Image: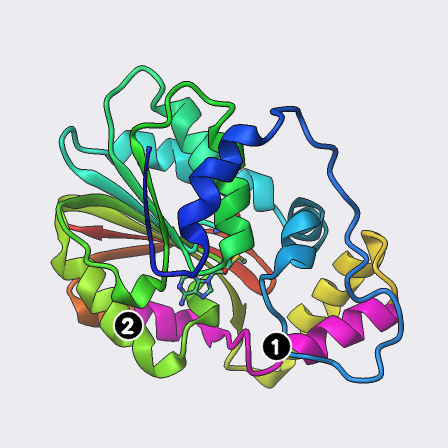
Amino acid sequence: MEVRHSCTSALNIIKRTKKIILRKEKMKKDHVFADKKIRIKPFEFNKEVTNVFDDMLNRSVPFYLESIKRQAQLTAEYYQQGSRIYDLGCSHGNVGMLILDQLKSREFSMVAVDSSIPMIEKYLKRLGRNDNTSQIELVCGFLEDIQIKNASVVLINLTLQFLDIKKRDDLIKKIYQGMNSNGILLLTEKTIHTSKVLDNLQTKFYKTFKLENGYSRLEISQKRDALEKVLVPDTIETHKNRILNAGFTLFDVWLKWFNFASMIAIKE
Ligand SMILES: C[S@@+](CC[C@H](N)C(=O)[O-])C[C@H]1O[C@@H](n2cnc3c(N)ncnc32)[C@H](O)[C@@H]1O
């Protein structure tokens, strides 16, 4: 497995990984925003978040598992032999693990990128348990700096929303230019609505979803404050226009739950 990096200390990751005892971890409960905070700091994908990330995803993203499972299947469907898969904002590899499973009988090449050192460290640790890891190149760096070449599948799952809004058009154009014909872009995002009425409705139902999943009103409100200016969602129309302007000719929203949408674009 090759690891490229632009994060400090990432060099030591492989050495440390070898020492890690490989055992199945129990999902740790997310209490990051449970206690009253005097000052809310901007949200970061740090060690504390990485440790509870699966619980956070499961309780905060409607249909998270369904979405990534289908994305792995779509990847298997559209992957072209000899090309590359890019997972931009790969975190600790939930999508990557499902893709490994889907493509286990095939040769493939995947570049998985994330700027968070704890996330990449955890991804490495998970890959250590898998026999089929040499096909994944982990990059600890910024997705906007990555060259996209010979891509048949590009996944951006819940990550474009964290990128500076001014850089989003260029990223999608770069992806289009580095993609082969019949390649696909899979994009999942939290979205807003152009209609205030519908926006309020989806925000209300999203809050209900989080309350049902055991988050308190305090946790919900402190996390919302931490994410303000860090997670900046677009409307589905903005995503669609950006994707079509980049050159993609086919676009669809294949999964939608109030303010969450999984989209596909195909370069014909
Ligand atoms: C919500 S998580 C993505 C979840 C993941 N794709 C999954 O399906 O489980 C967002 C990830 O994007 C990463 N990230 C945010 N901005 C980034 C950037 N500019 N370049 C690379 N990674 C970035 C964060 O470190 C974080 O791990």
Residue 233 part of the magenta-drawn span? yes
157 is higher (above) or lower (below) than 196: above
Q: Are marks 2 and 1 in contact (CB under 8 Å)?
A: no
Q: Secondary structure at mark 1?
A: helix
Does residue 93 appear anywhere in the picture?
A: no
- The residue at which mark 1 appears reads as 199
Task: Looking at this view, name the residue that lies furthest to the top.
Answer: 105
Give the label on residue 242, or none. Answer: 2
The type of residue carrying mark 1 is Asp
Residue 264 spot, x, y in % from top left: 34, 51
Q: What span is in magenta? A: 217-241
Q: Residue at x 70, y 75 (%)?
A: 224
In the image, residue 229 sits, relative to residue 256, either above or below, namely below
Picture coordinates of residue 189, whole percent (x, y): 48, 62
Q: Main secondary structure of the magenta part?
A: helix
Q: Secondary structure at mark 2?
A: helix
- From the viewer's perspective, tell me whether residue 136 is left or right of residue 203: left
Image location of residue 26, percent across then percent down: 74, 33
Mark 2 Cα shell of 10 Å, populated few (<14), some (14-19), many (≥20): some
Q: Which label's residue is closer to the chain start, 2 or 1?
A: 1
Mark 2 to mark 1 CA distance (whole Å): 21 Å
| Closer to the camera in the image, 234 or 11 | 11
